[in-house]
Amino acid sequence: MSNNADYPQLLEASDLLVASASAKGLSWTLCTEDRTIDASLSAAAQRARLVADWTYIRDAYIAKFPGVLTDTASGRPIFQVFGPVTVKTGSVWSSVLAEVFPDPNARPIVQSTDLLNGNDPIVEDGSYLWPGWGLFDKAATGAATTTAHVSSFNQAFYTKATANSWNPIFGGAYPRFKDYYADGAAPGAALESWWGVDLRALDGAVYDQCFTDARNNGAQFLQLVSWSDWQEGTSIEPSYEEGFKWLLQTQQQL
């Protein structure tokens, strides 16, 4: 809930996507970003913005549109946060969700991006798998990409999720990772240390390995990373170069 940048347009698009998915009888969920909250605000103001965001999710989405993704055991809605990036105090997240959803049986399960804030998730419900960090070690990039390295990265997440009883276990499948951030940076811009990753697809073997790891570790949900992130090379959307390759491989795995 912010008027900065293109956030109003993104919110409008999200409204339409949730409404359309629900109307078609599909399940839906959200991956929110707390980076929309201005980091220069006071802690109290940041918390108030977080309350406003989750109140909107409750009233504009959950209350209006059937089909929110739920945990089969508890019936609680499942959501993700990409981060957290701005609000990094776990007690704030817990208190905000308890305030907006006073009934604990209806309170959303919220999971964060694994490893984005170290090994310990800020939100209390755990994390979901996301490619990065050790997966991008220089020894694993370029021609040195191996399914063994990819599986080792994935397995570390599943082992941690199981050991910490995260529920649900929300895995991930990615076809490769080849970023174009350095190529697309503004002239003279400072380059990030991790830019230039070239984790190869190995003719689909990396994607297959991700599905295998999820099955072998009992993941209840699997996020496909990602539909159209062309700048990171993880896209599975049909393309001129590869046609329907990734959608067909997804179909075979499902």
Image: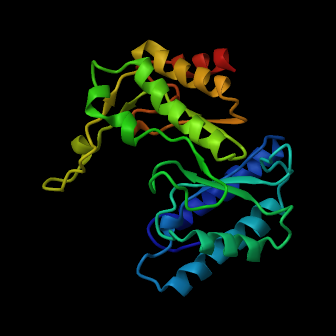
Image check: 172 left or right of 27? left
Q: How is the image coloured?
A: rainbow
In front of the other: 223 or 73: 73
Q: Residue furthest left?
A: 188
Q: Which residue: 44% across, 68% down?
A: 5
Where in the figure is residue 108, as x and y percent of width and height? 75, 59
In front of the other: 70 or 244: 70
Quadrant housing residue 21: top right
Count of residue discs? 0
Where in the figure is residue 95, as x and y percent of width and height? 68, 75
Q: Which residue: 82% across, 56% down?
A: 65
Where in the figure is residue 203, as x and y percent of width and height? 43, 13
Q: The N terminus appears in which quarter of the rendering? A: bottom right
Q: Is residue 25 visible?
A: yes
Q: Is residue 175 visible?
A: no
Where in the figure is residue 246, as x and y percent of width and height? 54, 21
Instruction: Relative to 19, say whether 133 is above or below.
Output: above
Q: Residue furthest front?
A: 163
Instruction: Relative to 251, say whether 83 is above or below.
Output: below
